[in-house]
Structures are given as C-alpha cells and as structure tokens.
Amino acid sequence: MSQNEKDTIKQALGEIIDPSSDQALKDKDSVRHVGIESAEDGAKRVNLVIGLDSDDDKTKQKMQRAIAKVIKLDLKYQGLKIEFELNKKKDSILDDTKQVRYIGVASGKGGVGKSTVAANVAIALKRLGKKVGIIDADIYGSSIPTIMGMEVTAPRGDENENIIPFEAHGIQLISTEFFIKKDQPIMWRGPMLGKMLNHFFYDVKWNDDIEYVIVDLPPGTGDVAMDIQKLIPESQMLIVTTPHPSASHVAVKAGFAAKQLNHSLLGVVENMSYYNHAGETLKIFGEDGGKQVAEKLETDVIQQIPIGQPKSGHHSLFEMDEENGVIYLGLANKLLKEIHNQ
Ligand SMILES: Nc1ncnc2c1ncn2[C@@H]1O[C@H](COP(=O)(O)OP(=O)(O)OP(=O)(O)O)[C@@H](O)[C@H]1O
Ligand SMILES: [Mg+2]
C-alpha cells in the first residue's frame, strides 16, 4: 500500500473534532497509527490508533461514528478497527521528562569519528542509567552495527508495521544497514529515502521507556544529508570535528545548516584532539579546530577526545576504566545538563 493512501486517511481524519478536547485530531497529532490490511477477496480494512483526551464511553462512541463516516462512507473502505489510547498531558512536568530526546551527531567531513562518538555517547548514557537508542541514519556508510558488534539481519516488524529495534550492549538500534543486502551499494534518494527515514523516526517500536535516541547522521551538507536533517523530529545537535582545518572548515557549514533547520546545538566535540605519549601531549592534527568551529557557531567545545585505542581490542568501544571511557562519561554528563537546562 502506498504512503499516499495512509496520508490521505490521516489528513481526512485530522479534521475530526475530538469532543474530549474540542480540538481537531491533527492539532494534537492524535492519529497515531494508520495501517491498511487487504483480505483475500480484495476488501480493505483500516486499522487505527487514535489518541483522546479522555476515554469515557460517550467520547469513544462519538469518535467511532465520526471516524466510520470518513473511512467507510467518504473513503469507501470496507473494514475499520479503532484502538483508542489516552493522550499524555503534555503540560505536566512528569510527562515532559518522559519525552524522547533526539541527539543528532553531525560532521562536515567524513571519517572524523562521528559514528565512534555516537556509539560511545550512547554507551556512556546507558552507564549513567539512561534508556538509550541509536538510529544509524548514515546512508552513505552505516557503521554502527559493526561498532556495536552486531550481526546484520533482516529487520523484524510487529503487527502494526512498526520496526522492532535490535539490541546490543543494552542499547536499542535501528540502522540503514538492516535494510540493504550485505556489501551492496544502494542509492537512497527521493521517495525511497523519505519512506525509510519516516519509518525510522516515526514507526520504531522502542521500548516504552526510551529516553534518548542518538542519531548518526551522514556527513556533509549535501542534499541527502539535509533531507535527513529535515526529517528528524526536533533535535539537539552535536557537531564533531578534528582539530585540523580541513575538518573544522566544513564542520562550521554543517553547524549552520543544522541551525537553519531549527535544530539547537549542544556543542562541538573535537575528536582526535591530542595523543598522550610518554608523558607528552602531542597535537598530531593541529589545534584549535574545535574552538574555531564553536566560536563561529556561537556555542562551546563541549569535549575534546584524545586519539586512543580501546584496550579490549575492540576497535571503537571504550570501557569505563580507560581514559576515553571516562571522557565519554564526562561528555554524557555534560549533555544531560545541557539538554535539561535548555
Ligand atoms: N579518538 C580516536 N582515536 C583513535 N581512532 C579514532 C578516534 N575516533 C575515531 N577513530 C577511528 O577513526 C575511524 C573513523 O571513525 P568513524 O567511523 O567513527 O568516523 P565517521 O566520522 O563516522 O566516518 P564516516 O564518515 O565514514 O561515517 C575509525 O577507524 C575509528 O575507529
Ligand atoms: Mg560513520
């Protein structure tokens, strides 16, 4: 079935007024799910999840009738199944703290350590007791499954066509890599790209209490990278650069692009900042790249990360007793402060 068909249904239902709030369904984003099932005889059934401000029988009956009119009479579907759920009260502080926060990790240049930072930040947040997921949206070079040591298998879905994330190191993960055949290049463009990303951002069945979703974005400011940034729900961005001018120069552009798309900046991570060797600190890739990016973007260098290899032999994930592991914990702490003070 086409996305358009679902959009048409969503749009038509959006105009219905919910008597429990006196607002149109679209105003509260109350059409939570639209699914279409085809029976063998060609009859189509629409499955809906609708949010309501109160779930007393009278409200539900009124809504049932209004929705049936749209689905069966106006749009001519044969079957209809509605599940109602109670809307969360957005203005309560409790619910606000439950809201999923998206943390986008972006860079101007490839190879600066964006995915390494994304994975280690996720693990550090988990170590701080948070419920964390990762969306690996780097369609040019998805690498999070490899970093997390995960086997790539076909994604699973539930009965409502939601994607069920994979789990490794206690972190839930969804990746472009699960949707392509191993070692095959693919051009994600236009509608196909949009469809997959919409799935990633709106149809993943995260464990209910997920708090933070880290998004590994494609590097750069090309069309595709920007399309992806446009599709992410309101997000706070970390900009990754190395100290080298070749990276910092384009990191500035990536930061401005994020700002233009109304994502707020959490700060700049300067990766591969220095190398500790025999008591000396060597600035192998130069210095101040991060500082310059932060100044131009009117934000701060939230963390410098040295060049380092995990002791475990794992090529990217650091333990808590290693220097970089401790640094990532510090970064995660600062991010939490930053996110909850904004
Ligand atoms: N602080 C560091 N010290 C040493 N090696 C690092 C560090 N950060 C990243 N690396 C290594 O650099 C390489 C590139 O890192 P990574 O894949 O995270 O970058 P990326 O920006 O996501 O790249 P891409 O654009 O390909 O997605 C990897 O081999 C990674 O292990
Ligand atoms: Mg990467």
Image: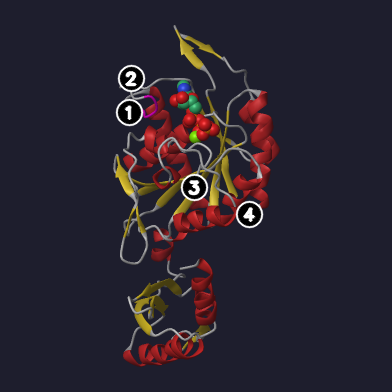
Q: Position of residue 52 (x, y in %)?
A: 41, 80
Q: Quarter of the image containing the N terminus?
A: bottom left
Q: Which residue is mark 4?
A: 262
Label pair 2/1, CB-CB below 8 angstroms: yes
> Magenta residues, as a range?
315-320
- How far apart marks 4 and 3 lie (CA) works out to 13 Å
> Is label 1 in a helix, a strand or a loop?
loop
Q: Mark 1 vs ligand 1: CB under 8 Å?
A: no
Q: For the stretch drawn in magenta, what is the main secondary structure?
A: loop
Neighbours of disc 1 within 10 Å: few (<14), some (14-19), many (20+): some
- How far apart marks 1 and 4 lie (CA) works out to 35 Å
> Is label 2 in a helix, a strand or a loop?
loop
Residue 160 among magenta residues: no
Q: Position of residue 57 (x, y in %)?
A: 32, 90
> Is label 3 in a helix, a strand or a loop?
strand
Label pair 2/4, CB-CB below 8 angstroms: no
